[in-house]
Structures are given as C-alpha cells and as structure tokens.
Amino acid sequence: MDIRENIPLAPYTTLKIGGPARFFASATKESDIAELVRFAKKNRRRLLVIGEGTNILVADVGFSGLVIKMEIKGRRVSASASASASASASAADPETVLVEASAGEIWDELVDWSVSEGLYGLENLSAIPGTVGAAPIQNIGAYGADASNVITNVRAFDTSKMAFVDLSNEDCRFSYRDSIFKQKKGRYIVTSVIFALKKRGRVNIEYRDLKEYFKRLGKTDPVALTPKMVREAVIEIRWGKLPDWKKWGTAGSFFKNPIISAKRYESIKAKYPDAPGFPEPDGRVKISAAWLLDRICKAKGLMEGNVGMYENQALVLVTKPGATAAAVVDFTTKLIEQIEHETTVKLEAEVEWVN
Ligand SMILES: Cc1cc2nc3c(=O)[nH]c(=O)nc-3n(C[C@H](O)[C@H](O)[C@H](O)COP(=O)(O)OP(=O)(O)OC[C@H]3O[C@@H](n4cnc5c(N)ncnc54)[C@H](O)[C@@H]3O)c2cc1C
C-alpha cells in the first residue's frame, strides 16, 4: 500500500488549516482497511479516518499517527447479502427500498440520487457536505431529520476485534450529534451504511424554516409535496445561511445546541425572556446555540484576525487564509467563556478536534 509521510492536512479539510499527518494513506477497498490498521498497530501509531474533512479542526502541529482517507466507493440497491436480519426485515416491506452506500461516497450525491428516484427519507438532509461513512459518526441532522431515522445498519471494521462487524441501528446508540462511533472513538472504521428509504410517503416539513418556505409558495399540504421539492427548498434555505465551503474556510455549525434541564432553561428565561427553547422527549430543553452566540456575544459577522463567525449565521465559524488552529481555539474559547459567564451554559464543539 502507498503510505505517504508528512502530508499536510489543511487541504483535506474545509477549515483549510492544520499541520501534517505523520502517515497518510487512501483506502479504496475494504481489504486496505485491515492492512492499514495492522500498520498503525505495528508502529504504535494512532489512527484517524477522514472523509471530506468537513467536520474536523486539525491542530497546527498536525497529527502524529496514520490518517486514512476513506475512498471506498459504490452503491447497491435493495437487500444485499451483507444486510443483517433487521435490514432484511425492512426489505420485506414492499414500500421500502434498502440502499447500501460505501463510506467514501459523497453524501449529497446519495441524497440527490435518492430524490431523483422519488425515494423518501433523505431529502431534509440535502446539501450537507461530507461522506456517507461520516454520516453515522455524529448522526448528521438538519431541517427536522436525523440520519438515524433511516439508517438500518452500519458495516464497520472493529479495530479491537480486527474483524468486520455489522451494527444495527440500535447498536449504533444514536442520539443528538452522537453515536457509538464517537463514544468509542477510534474503535470502528465505517465502510458502508444501509438506509431504508420509502417508495411512497409523506415529506416532513415541520421544521419552521421549511414550513414558512412552503407557506410563502401557498403549498401547505405535505401530501402534495415530493422529496425533490423538499430537497430544492432545503438547498435554497441553506445557501442563504451558510458560506460556500469551497470558498471560505468553514466546518458549518461549530457548536452543538445545548440540551439542559427545564429548570435551568427557566432560569435563563428569567434573564432573557426571548431565549428560544425546544422541548426534548425526556423533558429537557434544547436551546439554540446560534441564539446564545448572537444575543450574548453579538457573534454574527464578529471577526478576530482571520477567524470569525459568518455574517448570516452566528453558529457558523469561518476562517480566512492565514488562520491557525490556535487562533480558532482562542476565539471559540472566548465565546464559550462569555456565554458560560452569562448563563452558566457551557457550549460544546460539534467540530472534532484532531491533534
Ligand atoms: C458548510 C457546512 C455545513 C454543514 N452542515 C451540517 C448539517 O446541517 N448537519 C450536520 O449534521 N453536519 C453538518 N456539517 C458537518 C459535516 O458536514 C458532517 O459532520 C459530515 O458528516 C462530515 O463528513 P466528512 O466526510 O467531511 O467527515 P470528516 O470531517 O472527515 O470526519 C468527521 C468525523 O468522522 C470520523 N469519520 C469520518 N469518516 C469515517 C469513517 N468512514 N469511519 C469512521 N470514522 C469516520 C472522523 O474521524 C471525524 O471524527 C456541515 C459542514 C459544513 C462545512
């Protein structure tokens, strides 16, 4: 295998910053994975798998282990030999189409293909950058949908067992921007994901921005809407809020929305009556990190040197050429501290720190 040395990682990330990887290799087939893991173990090096690098912040000193760039491609439709019992059960439903996509596939190409086939399930997750293999890692979500709603199984290489394993949706322990892959960091290398999509269905336009979008068009009956229409709406809404990640350095939302107790939310409301809160099924309340950043730090468009927050969205960090990882940490730490001081809520990064 071609294992290269001292490869700058900045060009492999959308934040466009960070130092080199001590070792770097591309995996284009499943057998590459076992070989690369053996190399890392033999040389006592840590492993980092990357897709499109849209959700990582690499330290200026780089990463002293082996970076595996996931480039396994391919897509199969309907139940496959590798599909597990739970996926096969979904396939027994004639309205369900099982799609198995390899980890190196581009996420939005999968979404685009699914809506062009008239399939329901992925449309709300349109235009999220990155790969299919990364989707289960933080359980990507947007516009009222999470990847975990449609993932039935994940195939992964278990670096502890040195074998491929098939994880059911339940095994993945999905929650808000979280999964077993984050909880047991470094243990699993995802090689493919199976999605259960529907031939017929009803689109989900409950999310406020989507509801308003279709209301403006006079189309309020979800039954009359197709996944393609929802995809187009999501793309239009997203472009109004997000910087073009091909031009700006960015990783999208930098922080997670905090989930706090109802009591704590009431105390924030006492100080900031307009603080929006969204009830969670367990009684807690999700509060908007964008709102906290904007209200408390006036973060929209706030720049410090080459690092700042996007002018249209306070949650989206942007970098200009010359930015360093240290400057990002410095800038975001100040925001975290300011919000904690005012509300006692400590924002957590959604973007993963690599060092
Ligand atoms: C402009 C912009 C908008 C965004 N909008 C959203 C959004 O709406 N919703 C949302 O949820 N996210 C969003 N993101 C974040 C990002 O798109 C997702 O997290 C995406 O899934 C990351 O994919 P990636 O291939 O770039 O992963 P990377 O950034 O390369 O990796 C992210 C993490 O996943 C791990 N990983 C990647 N591939 C594998 C694999 N095959 N096996 C094991 N681990 C792996 C990495 O080690 C790392 O920990 C946005 C990012 C940007 C830049």
Image: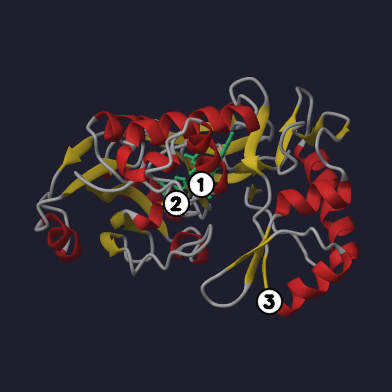
Count residues near mark 1 (Cα–Cα under 10 Å), then give few for <14, some for 14-19, many for 20+: some
Residue 253 drawn at (x, y percent): 64, 44
Q: Secondary structure at mark 1?
A: strand
Q: Write down the residue under mark 2.
A: 145
N-term-proximal mark, 1 vs 3 = 1
Q: Quadrant of the N terminus?
A: top left
Given contact means CB atoms under 8 Å apart, are the residues at marks 2 and 1 in contact? yes
Three-letter code for the amino acid on which mark 1 is drawn: Ala
Residue 308 drawn at (x, y percent): 80, 35
The colour scheme applied to this rendered structure is secondary structure
Is residue 2 or residue 28 the one in the foreground?
Answer: 28
* Image height of 9 relative to 175, above or below: above
Residue 243 drawn at (x, y percent): 65, 27
Identified at 39% across, 45% down, the residue is 133
How far is disc 2 from disc 3 in space, using C-alphas? 23 Å
Three-letter code for the amino acid on which mark 2 is drawn: Ala
- Confirm whether residue 21 shows in the render: yes
Q: Which mark is residue 261?
A: 3
Q: Which mark is residue 142?
A: 1
* Image height of 137 relative to 308, above or below: below
Name the side, left or right, on which 117 lies relative to 319.
left
* Image height of 51 relative to 162, above or below: above
Judge: label 1 CB < 8 Å from ligand 1: yes
